Structure formats: structure tokens, C-alpha cells
Image: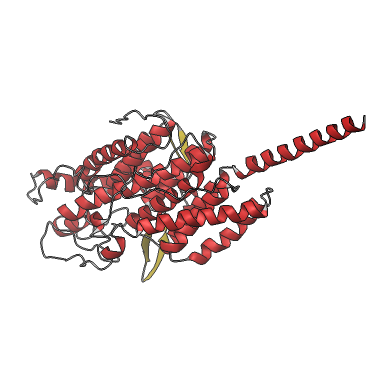
Amino acid sequence: MKYSILTFFLIVFFLFTNCEKKDTKKLTQNPEYIHRTVKKLTDVIVHDIFSPPVASRIYAYTMIAGYEALVPDFPEYQSLAGQIRDLKEIPKPDPNKTYCFPLASVHAILTTAKMNFIFSPEKIEEFENQIYTELKKTGISDEEYANSLLFGTKIAEHIVSWSRTDNYRESRTFPKYEIRDEPSRWRPTPPTYMTAVEPHWNKIRPMTLDSAAQFAPPPHPTFDTTRSSAFFKEVMEVYEVKKNLTKEQIEIAQFWDNNPFVMNLVGHASFASKQISPGGHWVGISKIACQKSNADIMQTMATYTLTGLTMLDAFISCWDEKYRSNLVRPETVINKYIDKEWTPLLQTPPFPEYTSGHSVVSSAIAVALTSIYGENFAFTDSTEVEYGFTVRSYQSFMKAAEEACISRLYGGIHYRAAIENGKEQGLKIGNWVVNRVRMKKISVEKIDRR
């Protein structure tokens, strides 16, 4: 009898401790840990005022770090090593040790950012203390906690080492953009007359593209100020649209502005306002898609990762064309040939016009998100609420991308050719990425959103 009672209590103890472990793992696999970490990264990117191309690089590398630190816990997913250019085999966890891989993932993201990408590591450290404490309180043992941080650090070091071979540091010393007195060529615009942003971004190593010029768009209409020319007709369209904007068109333009640094002039006073970049806006949409679909922590991390690497390739491709064509912005042409007092609704960004960055990036990421969540994924975009704008609803990612594209005409900062050809450029990039990057160990069908 005594033996039976003892056996009974041992069984109860075993079941209790086993359930406790399962509950701990369930708690740590809450995708909100990833969402909060990515949001903190976005906040720091906004605070540090990184340009859209540079922000895309930050998102790409940090998200890959988070993905690679989490993937060992999900056998249906696979590493990106060998799929992305020059990314070698990733450090493996020790099979004789226990880990909390969500903690390792969060740590890999934040450590990667601090080691090589941001200017304000102290803002990351404040958040680290909070989120690590929360994860520790879920029941992780001291040994598991230490193992997880060490593994996350190894992943971060591996990703940072890889990032340092992408030509970014070298490009900091390349020649500055040369301003020439040629009417067709881009030049700095009011009110800040900022110098050209990242004129050598096409020298940055892509994630998946064969080259920056792989999806070069067709040439823009030839610069010609003759009233009957195709180019001048596009100029006049920008001019006329501004005069007849509806309330909704104004709202659309402002919603998709996503200029990281806008200089506001009020009389003789001026002040700057910060916003998320175009890529940051789509990172916000990625979060909305994950939460609406109840994506688990691995799908959440995979979503952010696909968004990040697609974003970087899209910016590399777009910037390659921008500084090849070097096309002048509508504001400069209109002020010189039509109306010297004219100003666009949005502040003109400090880089050449063709193609439209938002059109390329939005279309590419829309394809990437559609590959995960489907063609008719309706959602309400609340990303801009914290920046003073309302929400907008869409029937699909492609519908949202199309609105982002046309917003550049409403804003007065792009001609139609840059928008339409930029969209096509982005679709090609998106399809290229989703057909070459395999996260789940299953095939992905080609998706063509035209």
C-alpha cells in the first residue's frame, strides 16, 4: 500500500512539473514579444532619423538575426543560410543545453541593432531590461536564461559580421552627389535644400537580387519643356492635380507621406517633425497582418523577415535607377517653367525622382505579404495613428500598395511614369524574392500581382 501511495504522488508530481514546463514554453512563445521588440526598433529608427534606404538595411539584418535565433525551435522552418547572398551557415544551439528560443530571438534582434546599426543604444538597453525581466518571470531557469542570451549573442555576432561585407561602410567614403547646371538633372529642393540621400546605394549588396540593375525599369519620358511633349504633359498633370485635390486625396497623400524628416516652416520659425519611413510603414502593416491572423511567434518572425529583406532589395533596385536617370523633381520644373510660387502638398524628398521609392517598395512588400496571407486579406491600417493621422482600410495588400503609389501624385512629388513603372518594378522584385526565399520546408508558388 505504501508503495502504491508513493507511486501515486510521484506521478502527480511528474505531471505537475511537466505541465508547468509546458505552460512556461507557451508563455514565452507569445508573439507579442517579437511585436514589441520590432516596434522598439522602429521607434529608435525614427528617433535617430535614418533615411529610408538605411532604415531598410537595419530592418533586413535585424529581422534575419531574430529569425535565425528562433528557427531551431521550429523544425518545419529552415535557415536562410545559403539562400541569401553570402550568408554562411548559422551557429547551432548545443543539443545538450536547454534554451528559450524566443528570448534568444529578441536578444539577437536588439543586440544586432546595438552592435552595428543604430545611434542610440541606450534606448534599446532600457527596453532590454524590461522585456528580459518579463521573459525571466515566465519560469525560465537561470541556466536556460543564460544559454538563450549567449545563443542570441552568437547569432547577432554572425549577422553583424556578415553585414560588414555588404559595402555599406565603404560607401560612406564614396564621392558626394555632383550638382550640375543641367535642367533635366535633379538638384536640391526647398525648404531645406538637403544634399542627395545615398547616391551610391546601388553599391550595397542585395539580399537576393543578382544585381542592383536586375529589374531596371524602362526609361522615363525624355526631359522636354515643349508644351506638347510627353514629359511636360506629366509635369502639367502634377500641377493640375494639386489645384483640384479632394479631401480624401489630401488624406491619402499625408497618410503615405512617410518622410523621416520634414521641416515645417511657420512664418520665420521652423521646426522638424519625424515620421516612419515607407519601409517602416509596411513593417507596421506586417504587424497588423500577423495579429489579425493570430500568427504564432515563428510565422510572426518569418513575416517581419520577409518584409525586411524584400524592402532592402527594393530600395537597392529603386536607388540604382534614381541615380542613373537623375531626373529632376516636379517642384523644380514647375517653379522654373510654370509657376515660381507653386509648392507640392508634401515636402519633396532629397533624391532624384525616377522611379518612385514608395511605389517600388510598397508593391514589392505587398507581394511578399500576399505570399503569406493570401490575395484577399482585408485589414485596417492604424500604423499612422501615433503620428496624428486616422486609420485607413483596404481589401488587400495590393490595394494598399496601389494607394501608396498614387499618393505620390497627390503629394506633388512624382510624375505618373515614376509611379506606374515603379509599381511594375516592385512587383518584379517581390515575385523574385518570394520565389527564391524558402522559409517553410515546402514549395512556394509564384505569385504575380498585376
Snapshot colouring: secondary structure
Residue at the extreme bottom: 268
Q: How many marks?
A: 0
Q: Nearer the viewer, residue 241 or 49?
A: 49
> Considering only vertical position in the picture, is 73 above or below 259?
above
User: Which percent across, then down, holds residue 73?
Assistant: 53, 41
Q: Nearer the viewer, residue 13 or 4?
A: 4
For residue 80, what is the image quadrant?
A: top left
User: Which percent across, then down, holds residue 52?
Assistant: 34, 55
Residue at the extreme right: 1
User: Which percent across, then down, holds residue 26?
Assistant: 63, 40
Which residue is depicted at the point 52% across and 49% down?
105
Tell me: 307 left or right of 76. Answer: left
Would you say residue 431 is visible in this rendering?
Answer: yes
> Considering only vertical position in the picture, is 366 above or below 132?
above
Which residue is depicted at the point 59% across and 42% down?
29
User: Which percent across, then down, holds residue 97?
Assistant: 59, 48
Would you say residue 41 is visible in this rendering?
Answer: no
Tell me: 184 left or right of 34. Answer: left
Q: Nearer the viewer, residue 304 or 208?
A: 208
Which residue is depicted at the point 11% across and 43% down?
230
Locate the N terminus by quadrant. top right
